[in-house]
Structures are given as structure tokens and as C-alpha cells.
């Protein structure tokens, strides 16, 4: 399962199967939701979705000593923003045991 991807089309199909709503309306709502997240990030506003996580913009400091990995030449990089996501506590707990050999043992990797 580690290599699977869920696309926007997959999300639309899943919502369609669960609700029976029109696919065009579902696509419009999902597109609008994504656009609202982008707009908020462009205004450097964080988006907190309780139980899921937080989208935010972080500023990376510029530096003079960066290296182009293709050519090896030194280049300078200006300060710039990056979009970041911090998972919420519920999401962290829900995915904690993915990939572990035994999902019932709570002593592997720390406490719950």
C-alpha cells in the first residue's frame, strides 16, 4: 500500500459514491475548497482543520552557499516561502501504527 496515490478524481468518485451528489457539483466544491486554502496561504494565513491538521506558510532564510546539484556551481538563494502541513493529534494517532508489524503493541515507538 505504500506506493498508492489518491487523486482529486478519486476523491470526487468517493464522495459521489457516499452521497449520490452530482459529480460536477462535487468537483466544484473540492476545487473551491482547494482555492480557498491557496488564497489563505497567499495571504500568509494559517488554515486549521481540527482533527486533521494545519496548513501554513513558513519562510526559508536565503543563503549564499547553496550548490546547484546538477552543475555543482555555487548559487545564492533568496528568502522564500514554502507551504507546510502539520498533522493534527487525531490524524497522528490514526496513522501511528501503519507499517508496524503488530498494530496491537503500544510499546513500539513510544506511548500513545
Image (cartoon, rainbow, N blue to C red):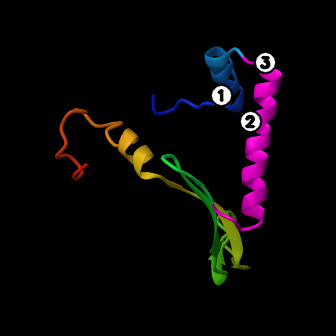
| Callout 2 touching callout 1 (CB < 8 Å) | yes
What is the CA distance from the residue labelled 1 to the residue labelled 3? 13 Å
Return the residue nearer the eye: 34 or 103.
34
Q: How crowded is mark 3: few (under 14 residues within 10 Å), some or many (20 or more)?
A: few
Q: Which of marks 3 and 2 is nearer the N terminus?
A: 3
Question: Residue at label 3?
Answer: 22
Which portion, as a residue range, is magenta? 21-46
On the image, which quarter does residue 80 sit in? bottom right
On the image, which quarter does residue 66 sit in? bottom right
Could you tell me which quadrant the N terminus lies in?
A: top left
Q: Earlier in the sequence, mark 2 or mark 1?
A: 1
> From the viewer's perspective, is 20 left or right of 111?
right
Vertical side of 17 occupied by 77: above or below: below
| Numbered disc total | 3
Q: Position of residue 41 (x, y in %)?
A: 72, 61
Question: Residue at label 1?
Answer: 11
Vertical side of 40 occupied by 19: above or below: above
Question: Residue at label 2?
Answer: 30
Tag 1's secondary structure?
A: helix
Amino acid at each position: 500500500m505504500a506506493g498508492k496515490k489518491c487523486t482529486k478524481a478519486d476523491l470526487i468518485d468517493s464522495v459521489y459514491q457516499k452521497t449520490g451528489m452530482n459529480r460536477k457539483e462535487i468537483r466544484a466544491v473540492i476545487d473551491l475548497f482547494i482555492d480557498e486554502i491557496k488564497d489563505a496561504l497567499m495571504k500568509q494565513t494559517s488554515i486549521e482543520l481540527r482533527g486533521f491538521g494545519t496548513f501554513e506558510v513558513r519562510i526559508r532564510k536565503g543563503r549564499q552557499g547553496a550548490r546547484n546539484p546538477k552543475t555543482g556551481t555555487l548559487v545564492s538563494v533568496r528568502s522564500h516561502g514554502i507551504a507546510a502541513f502539520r498533522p493534527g493529534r487525531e490524524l497522528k494517532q490514526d496513522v501511528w501504527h501503519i507499517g508496524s508489524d503488530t498494530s496491537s503493541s503500544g510499546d513500539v515507538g513510544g506511548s500513545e
